[in-house]
Amino acid sequence: MTPAEWQFIGFTAEMALASTLTILPPGLALAWLLARRQWRGKALVETFVSLPLVLPPVVTGLVLLKLLGRRGPVGHWLHEQFGLDIAFTWRGVVLALAAMSLPLLVRAARTAFEEVNPAFEQMARTLGAGEWRVFWTVTLPLARRGVLAGALLALARALGEFGATIMVAGNIPGQTTTLAVAIYSSVQQGEDAHAWTLAGVSAALAFAAVWTSERLVKRRPS
Amino acid sequence: MKSTLHACFTKRFAAGPVIRVDDLRLDRSGVTVLFGASGSGKTTVLRCLAGLDRPDEGTIRFGEEIWSDVARRVFLPPARRQVGFVPQDYALFPHLTVARNIAYGLSGIPAAECASRLAETIRWLGLQGLEQRLPGQLSGGQQQRVALARAVAPRPRLLLMDEPLAALDAPTRLRLRGDLRQLLRTLNLPTILVTHDRTEAMALGDAVVVMVDGAIAQQGRVPEVFSQPTNLAVADIVGMETVRPGRVLGVTDGLATVALGTAQVTALADNLPSGTEDVYACIRAEDVVLARDETIHSSSRNRLPAVVRSIRRDGPLARVELDCGFPLSALLTPQACEELALREGSRVLALIKAPQIHLIARAAGTWD
């Protein structure tokens, strides 16, 4: 493989990892709220979080671009206040990947939290544990397989994301070009061999992530 | 008198049942058994006391503290009640070792003290050697002791146990009943223990609160409640085998003469409102003595000629159904049956002491 190909692979892996780590805290918090609390507007939030699963990814990308672009409300403010640019930078890549993979994490983690018998959490409360301690010592450890499986699925999704990424971050080789985007532009330029190499790497990464995730979900502790 | 725990509350369920606790008091250390059939609301009461369920009305006080007061919107979360709770299935944390399960409630105290308390609790409950096991690797009896250890290690102010022996198989249950009694004695903590088992209630309880259909039907010392139920529902649940409607013919010197079917019996009238005519007479099968010989010497006031209707095995004993002018159950050893040569149709004498016929006032004309 050429150094350029290695760069695409390394960059994509970094971005996907960063995105997965970024969505873990808010994703787990949201999953817990959906699994364990009743609140107004819950159904609405549920729907919104899952929307990127079914929307054309370019639509999600378009919405993010319009929000985060230098003329968008959020992007403009970030640029003015902190001199931060999101669109067409690696940050844009991370955000696009995060938005696209969040639903997978939240749905898996929510199911995992719901499967934890509330009796264990209640027991912990009678033993003096506050909600924070109950979550860290009881809920999360008992839901760890489902949560990990969800995180791996989110990672796999991020590794292969195309539509939202190209909208928000474009195709700047060495700066924002991910594997999927590189495959697309290789084919556009008639470099099929190059495209096939990258496609193979992509498939191997996706296979490893999904396979591990499935193993985690199926092998329930007795 | 000041009580440790004082609860008066109502809990409603969407599906219909209503649990009403009217003036539940606990004022000494010792074991109070919450006794009733399944579905009578015992577990709900326990969960409200632990703070795991919120009452819909009323108050729960513990000493000077208000744990729950719906009208004043006061609710002390379970984490701050310092209550030890042992649920029916024990709910041991499956991902933590025995030692870490027991130490779970010991966070926030210095490490050295935590270690010594853990060791003390493990020793006291005889769990040495099991410290590093996971709950899934323990027998039912061991799990029960770990659950008890975990509940008492933080030195709670009140211990709540929900059917502590129900999850065990019958032989283990019998073996552990005695152990549990011993442990609870040593603990000397105010304890509320839920059970639907009469023998367990009598074996483990100092006081008993009988629940029928979501409400407290009677509370008092175990021997009092079990020998003197104040209403038919309690008599039924505490296991008075013979409950028959009768009529008081007269009362002299605290002894009532009661017509039961075609027979007449003498019973204590001391807790019967004066002037009561219609009663239920309650007799425990184990309090009925059978004799063959008219001339036998006995202090029993009641000597009723009876005919044996049926004899069947009941565990290690034989249950003899008699007709002595009213249907009467007696519980005998098989050896006693042999000695008396009891057969269906045998004529015997049923002897019952007056204090063992318990009278409950009934509304005139009620008997179904």
Image (spheres, rainbow, N blue to C red):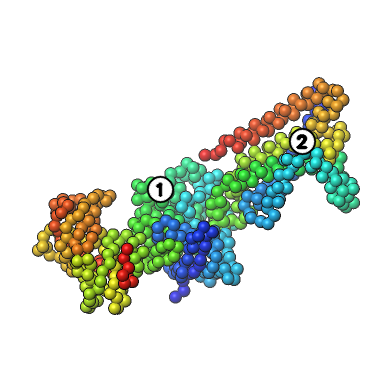
Residue A96 position, x and y percent, is: 79, 41
Query: Residue at image x 43%, y 44%?
Result: B139
Residue B164 position in % (x across, y down): 43, 53
- In the rendered image, the vertical position of residue B131 relative to residue A179, given as above or below: below
Find disc 1 in the rendering and name its residue: B168
Q: Residue at x 86, y 40 (%)?
A: A88
Q: Position of residue A67 (x, y in %)?
A: 84, 47
Q: Is residue B192 visible?
A: no
- Picture quarter containing residue B230? bottom left
Quick check: A85 left or right of A162? Answer: right
Q: Quadrant of the C terminus of chain B?
A: bottom left
The amino acid sitting under disc 2 is Glu
Same subunit, tags 1 and 2: no
Counting from the top left corner in percent of width and height, residue B78 is at 56, 60
Please give the residue where the numbered disc 2 appears in the rendered image: A161
Mark 1 or 2, closer to the camera: 2
Residue at 21% over, 52% down: B311
Q: Is residue A69 shown left or right of residue B347?
A: right
Q: Is residue B2 left or right of residue B225?
A: right
Name the image quarter holding residue B332: bottom left
Q: Nearer the viewer, residue B58 or B143?
A: B58
Query: Residue A172, can we see it?
Result: yes
